Structure formats: structure tokens, C-alpha cells
Image (spheres, grey):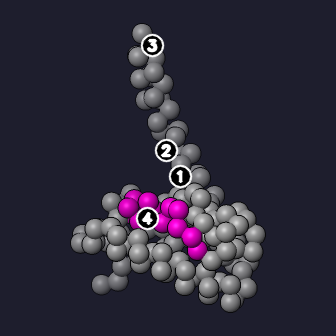
Amino acid sequence: MIRHLLLAFGLCCAPAAHAQATLDYTQAKQRADADEAALAPEQAASLRDAQAVALDAGVSACATPTADTSPFVVVAELDATGKVVRTWREGTTPLAICVQKQIAGKTLSAPRRAPFFTSFELSFTP
């Protein structure tokens, strides 16, 4: 009986969990856009350079994309030292999932304040 209740609970709540994850991503992306826009130009350039290095390393560590060329965004929350402490992603391709895992725990440029949200965006050009 308990198994049936747990299964029923899991089935009814799975869509709600997915909706919450989407909401969390949207809120994190909005926060990243605002936090990045508040940076001084030299700080923004430094952060973007660190992001590019982390993103390149993440893509290199993952399987080389073949048909998996959908654009995706990973949003990261940084602590006061610049370490990535939490991530969200838009995109469900294996490459997006792998890159999100590769970025988790990386250290970027230390932000002026913490928490600080930033986003990694990858799109492929033919």
C-alpha cells in the first residue's frame, strides 16, 4: 500500500518538479542578466574571459558535438571567491547536460559581491 501511495505521489508531483526547475532557471537567468549588466566594463571583460576558458574546457571534456548542436545556456551562481556553487541549464541535449556538470565547481573571477549570477551561452554557427 505504501509503495502505491509513493508511486502515485511521485507521478502527480513529477510535472510540478519540472515546472519548478523551469521557474528556477528563468529566475536565475533574469538574475544573471541583471548582475552582469551591473558590472563595470573591465570587470565584465574579465568575467567573460574566465567564462570562455571554463566553457571551452567544459566542451572539450565532453563528447565532440556532431548532431548535438542545439544552443544552450548554463546559469551559474558564484560565491565570494568566484567558485560556482550552483547551476541551472536551459537545454536537454547530452552536451548541455555534460557542460553544466563540467562548469559546476569551477572558479571564475571573484565577483564584487556574492552571491553573483552569471550565464554561459553556447551556440553553433555553420
Residue found at x 62% / y 62%:
77
Q: The N terminus is located in which quarter?
A: top left
Quarter of the image where the C terminus is located:
bottom left
Task: Say whether residue 116 is visible.
Answer: no
Residue type at mark 4: give it.
Gln
Q: Which residue is mark 2?
A: 18
Frontmost residue, 114 versus 92: 114
Q: Secondary structure at mark 1?
A: helix
Q: Label 1 to label 3, Cα distance in Å?
A: 30 Å
Mark 1 residue crowding within 10 angstroms, few (<14) / some (14–19) / many (20+): some
Tell me the amino acid under the disc marked 3.
Answer: Ile
**Front: mark 4 or 2:** 4
Task: Select label 4 or label 1 by which is in front.
Answer: 4
The mark lying in front, picked from 3 and 4, is 4
Q: Name the residue nearer the viewer: 18 or 101.
A: 101
Distance of label 1 from label 2 (alpha carbons) = 6 Å
Mark pair 3, 4: CA separation: 38 Å
Quadrant hosting residue 29: bottom right
**Which residues lie in the magenta part?**
96-108
- Write down the residue under mark 3: 2
Quick one: label 3 or label 2, which is nearer the N terminus?
3
**Residue 90, image x and y in percent?**
47, 61
Q: Secondary structure at mark 2?
A: helix
Q: Give the number of the disc on residue 22.
A: 1
Q: Please state which amino acid type lies under the numbered disc 1.
A: Thr
> Tag 4's secondary structure?
helix
Of mark 1 and mark 3, the one earlier in the sequence is 3
* Kind of residue at badge 2: His
**Residue at 24% in and 72% down:** 66
